[in-house]
Amino acid sequence: MPEGHTVALHARRFASELGGRVLRASSPQGRFAGGAGLVDGRVLGGTEAHGKQLFLDVGDDRWLRVHLGLYGTWTFGEGPPPPPIGAVRLRLEADAGRGVWADLRGPTACEVVTTPEKHAVQARLGADPLRRDADVPTLLTRIERSRAPIGTILMDQTVVAGIGNVYRAESLFRARLSPFAEGRSIPRDDVEGLWADLRVLLRDGVRRERIVTTDAADRPRGRIRPEDAHYVYRRTGLPCRRCGTPVATREVAGRNLFWCPSCQA
DNA sequence: GCGGAATGTAGAT
DNA sequence: TCTACCTTCCGCT
């Protein structure tokens, strides 16, 4: 399930496993038959992740743009692809060598776009903690001028690209910031610290291929169980790992927000 | 087997 | 602020 770290992993995986190869594209489900026809037979060039957007260069100034949304998934495999399981919107296969394939299910967006259209999408995206070209000065300015709560700002992909509900809750806990604090009320040092921590967290997410935000000192030793991977996300009513106060939750703009009312006063 | 929730966004109101 | 999108998984019956 996708926040920015997942999409970055997908971009790498497509580059390493299908890059430079002729693609066979099909839409077993049928909803992307036209687009698959445009991709079929092309060679996969570069791949790029920007926030939660994945771009695959299929040549001739055309890109496959995929946004997984809430429940979209990519499934990768080697060897002969199995009969499609569930509704496979797009199946990509590399026709040479080992026979690598990738199945796409349930995306919010899957379309073939031109290079200018790709740039237009990217122009609307904010700073991506995983990208070297992240525009940090603009990010800092946007936050320090905003009357919106920081918990809302972090989910705004035009400000920060790639942060989802887990990283929002967890990064604010780690920064000891209330999700309800207005952006403009937060000292610049704290905003810079939050940004630096997001970079650490997402890079760690890429490395582990999962989101782990608890420091080693705040969880049992050994293999990290799912219930020990977070401080507040989906821990409503459970004691805060740092102070024991029950974790609070509230629905904000249709999403569940989790925080410790004591640590993040 | 069913209902609800889920790491998200776009478009209508 | 709301609903639609549309898939998977989990808990409950």
Image (cartoon, coloured by chain):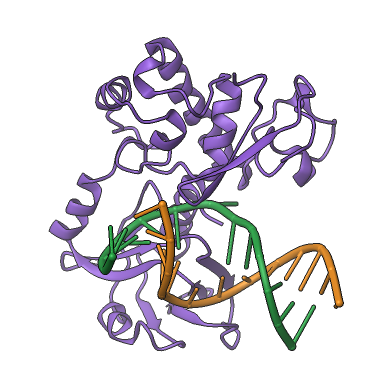
Chain colours: A purple, B green, C orange
Report the front residue among A118 and A188.
Answer: A188
Report the front residue among A13 and A199.
Answer: A199
Residue plotted at (47% across, 30% down): A199
A4 sits to left or right of A83: left
From what the image shows, is residue A105 above or below residue A37? above
Residue plotted at (38% across, 84% down): A31
Report the front residue among C5 and A201.
Answer: C5
A106 sits to left or right of A215: left
Q: Name the spot of residue C9 as percent of width and height, x first.
A: 71, 66
Q: Name the spot of residue A91 as percent of width and height, x first.
A: 45, 79
For the N terminus of chain A, the quadrant is bottom right
From what the image shows, is residue A125 above or below residue A149? below
Name, please, the residue furthest toward the left.
A116
Q: Name the spot of residue A209 as percent of width and height, x first.
A: 61, 47
Looking at the rendered structure, the number of numbered marks drawn on it comes to 0
Residue plotted at (34% across, 19% down): A184
Can see residue A216?
Answer: yes
Rendered image quadrant of residue A244: top right
